[in-house]
Image (cartoon, rainbow, N blue to C red):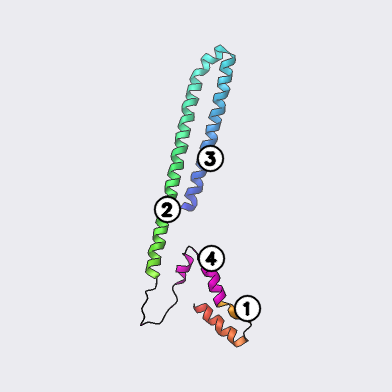
Amino acid sequence: MGSNVYFPVLWLVIATLVIGIFAATSAMSYFRLVMAENAVVGGQSRRQLSYLKQLHWLLWAIAGTMCAGGVAAWYQEKSANDKDILVKRTQLMPVFDKNNMWEAPDPYLAETDKQAKLIAYGRDIIARTHLRIGASNSEVVVAEWFATRI
């Protein structure tokens, strides 16, 4: 199951468990109040109170385990994604050779860079400078053709 479905469902289940914990806690406080008021009912309710205490701690244990599992799964997926991006970037990274003419690197490198927005802004400035300075129409057509090839 992909993380697009897995993580939201996981956190929904955890939220449901927390709601169950609060319900068990409120039931325990109600039974404690009833036990304090009436000794006869207190004797009958001890078993239920014990059961609710066990349920309370069981729900906390499940919720804690699921939270830890969710964080671990998220970290593992993030690490695997970062590793895949690093592998792809090293494969696409241009190698400097003084005998060859310079070629623009693959656009994927700019998309996966930590400063992707800054790179896109700089590329936009270079590609559209002619619009800001005021070139003639023939120069605009040639510049736009080059901008699509970069």
Disc 4 is placed on an element classified as: helix
Amino acid type at circle 4 is Lys
Disc 3 is placed on an element classified as: helix
Residue wearing tag 4:
117
Q: Image point 55% across, 14% down: which residue?
A: 41
Q: Choose mark 4 or mark 3, whichever is in front.
A: 4
Residue wearing tag 2:
77
Q: Image point 59% across, 83% down: which residue?
A: 140
Residue 134, by quadrant, is: bottom right
- Give the distance between the C-alpha atoms of the residues marked 3 and 1, in whole angstroms: 53 Å
Amino acid type at circle 3 is Ala
Residue wearing tag 1:
132
Graded by Cα atoms within 10 Å as few (under 14), some (14 to 19) or many (20 or more), the crowding at tag 2 reads few
Disc 1 is placed on an element classified as: helix
Asked if residue 120 is among those painted magenta in the image, a careful observer would answer yes
Q: Earlier in the sequence, mark 1 or mark 4?
A: 4
Graded by Cα atoms within 10 Å as few (under 14), some (14 to 19) or many (20 or more), the crowding at tag 1 reads few
- Give the distance between the C-alpha atoms of the residues marked 1 and 4, in whole angstroms: 20 Å
Disc 2 is placed on an element classified as: helix
Q: Earlier in the sequence, mark 3 or mark 1?
A: 3
- From what the image shows, is residue 25 above or below residue 12? above
Magenta segment: 99-126
Q: Residue 32: horizontal and vertical position, in percent?
A: 55, 20
Asked if residue 103 is among those painted magenta in the image, a careful observer would answer yes
- Give the distance between the C-alpha atoms of the residues marked 4 and 2, in whole angstroms: 24 Å
Residue wearing tag 3:
15
Q: Earlier in the sequence, mark 4 or mark 3?
A: 3
- Give the distance between the C-alpha atoms of the residues marked 1 and 2, in whole angstroms: 43 Å
- The residue nearer to you, when weighing 94 against 137, is 94
Q: Earlier in the sequence, mark 1 or mark 2?
A: 2
Check contact, mark 1 vs mark 2: CB within 8 A: no
- From what the image shows, is residue 40 above or below residue 82? above
